[in-house]
Image: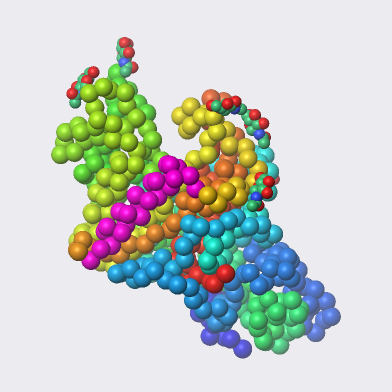
Amino acid sequence: MEWSVIQKKVGPLLWLLVISTVLVLFIMHSSPAFSVSIKAVLTQSPLVTASDVTNQSASLPANTGGVTPVHDGSSSPQLSADGIEEQCDTSKGKWVREPGASIYTNLTCPTYPDINNCGKYGKDQSYLYWRWQPDGCDIPRFEPETFLNIVRGKRMAFVGDSLARNQIDSLLCLLSQVTSYAFIAGANSTPEISRSYDLQHDALILVQAETPREVSRDSSGKYVTWYFPPHDFTLMVMWTEYFVEARPRIINGTASNSFEIHLDRVSTSWAEKLPGVDYAVLSGGNWFFRAIHLYEEGKIVGCVNCREQNLTEFGVAVTIRRALRTALRFISSCEDCEGLVTFLRTFTSSHFENGSWLTGGYCNRTQPSNETRTPPDDVAWEIRKIQLEEIERVRRPESGGKTRFGVLDVTKAMMLRADAHPGDHWTKKSKASVNDCLHWCLPGPIDMWSDLLLATLEKKFLPS
Ligand SMILES: *[C@@H]1O[C@H](CO)[C@@H](O)[C@H](O)[C@H]1NC(C)=O
Ligand SMILES: *[C@@H]1O[C@H](CO)[C@@H](O)[C@H](O)[C@H]1NC(C)=O
Ligand SMILES: *[C@@H]1O[C@H](CO)[C@@H](O)[C@H](O)[C@H]1NC(C)=O
Ligand SMILES: *[C@@H]1O[C@H](CO)[C@@H](O)[C@H](O)[C@H]1NC(C)=O
Ligand SMILES: *[C@@H]1O[C@H](CO)[C@@H](O)[C@H](O)[C@H]1NC(C)=O
Ligand SMILES: *[C@@H]1O[C@H](CO)[C@@H](O)[C@H](O)[C@H]1NC(C)=O
């Protein structure tokens, strides 16, 4: 009997559920219908499908709640000075077919955002059945209970643009799913279940992980905080387009699509909320493709995408480098950020064909690309390189930084997923709204970013 395991994993409210289920299981144990029933329970769970249990067990990480997994995650880590090493090069690999769907759906996620509900708006669901397979390692599938145990008592902030929001929406859905198992002796399990979990135990009880509770939201919905009471975990999203101070340019009295940004001044709107945060995930880049006037020391120094003859054109990549450096310097020297670990989620490009976010275009591909080569002049690849260089710079001991930095390297994987954006399958506000070839359908490949975050936090990638 694993009662201590059960006690640890189950909040007081769920005790009733567990105890009543135990009773039911023990009663059913005496009936020949039992093994059929437990299988039915498993197949109805969004996490463990029948095909998972019978065919996919070898490729799934063990969901063994307290039982030691069979693997030890030995891969060749690239050690950096501060210990947040990238253990697995996730920038090389391919999308492989994955018969098991995501652990959540638009029906099982309590915080599900309609804007990413591609299935409801008619998108074919074949984009769900793929898994990112890096060349040298496996990324374990997300395990909500494991994640919540790691972040118990902590505060995590996603800082950035709408893709930061897209990522946190994915994480909220993942965390709300059925995931914990308690093992009860005395009942027969089916051979499939024993094999798949490598257990001597006899029966499984599924326990629901927790539903996030929204505790604060500003009027624009750009700063939202959720709380997970049993794990005392706080999750926040903080909006910033550029990380540095920015405001829309006023042209003829109205705010325009273009911006003025101060490359040397961090934006206080997120920066002053950073103290007290334990984990920050930075997400940005796509706003730098607009027309932007650039300032340093309060003076205009140049611009991006503007046609003014007398201003120096900086280019997107250089501008991202300068703004990111300012943000990372601020974080690394932040006085009240004891213990902060910052992850940079590398850039992902949009997939507009014949257009852009501002002009339109479409993205109606139906399969991931299998292209392994990345053109050397690819903009996304160039931005990723700059992001990695700036992280390396701030990680160097001589930078005198006080906090630690890691990378979630998703650029290449997402470059290949033109098939997984809403496209025209979303709630457009008006007929004139463009297709969305920038954000990602939920569930979808963006869920992998959380797989990667958890594996990085746990320092546990699997040998492939
Ligand atoms: C959920 O998604 C499915 C496609 O997977 C779609 O058919 C259905 O309409 C959606 N339901 C809701 C309530 O959004
Ligand atoms: C501002 O308004 C004036 C007069 O309506 C117009 O001539 C000018 O082109 C406008 N400038 C811009 C940048 O839209
Ligand atoms: C650049 O030229 C525009 C007019 O074409 C002028 O309004 C602006 O002040 C000039 N900027 C600088 C930095 O000289
Ligand atoms: C997309 O643009 C390319 C060149 O810009 C053009 O050759 C092609 O016909 C366009 N395709 C569509 C479907 O408009
Ligand atoms: C994608 O959309 C474009 C423009 O509407 C169209 O020309 C093309 O045939 C579509 N491709 C597929 C695979 O549906
Ligand atoms: C890549 O996909 C194309 C079809 O989109 C296919 O013709 C080609 O054989 C694939 N290449 C590899 C290496 O799988």
Residue in view at x 31 percent, y 23 percent: 307
Q: Position of residue 159 (x, y in %)?
A: 36, 51
Residue 380 is a magenta residue: yes
Q: Position of residue 17 (x, y in %)?
A: 62, 73
Q: Is residue 97 above or below residue 139?
A: above
Residue in view at x 16 percent, y 33 percent: 299
Q: Residue furthest right?
A: 32
Q: Position of residue 25 (x, y in %)?
A: 72, 79
Which quadrant would the C terminus be assigned to in this image? bottom right
Magenta highlight: main SS: helix
Point out the stretch of residues depicted in magenta.
374-397
Could you say which quadrant of the image residue 177 lies in? bottom right
Q: Is residue 178 above or below residue 303?
A: below
Depth check: 111 or 64 in front? Answer: 64
Quarter of the rendered image showing ligand 3: top left
Q: Position of residue 145 (x, y in %)?
A: 52, 70
Residue in view at x 58 percent, y 51 percent: 444
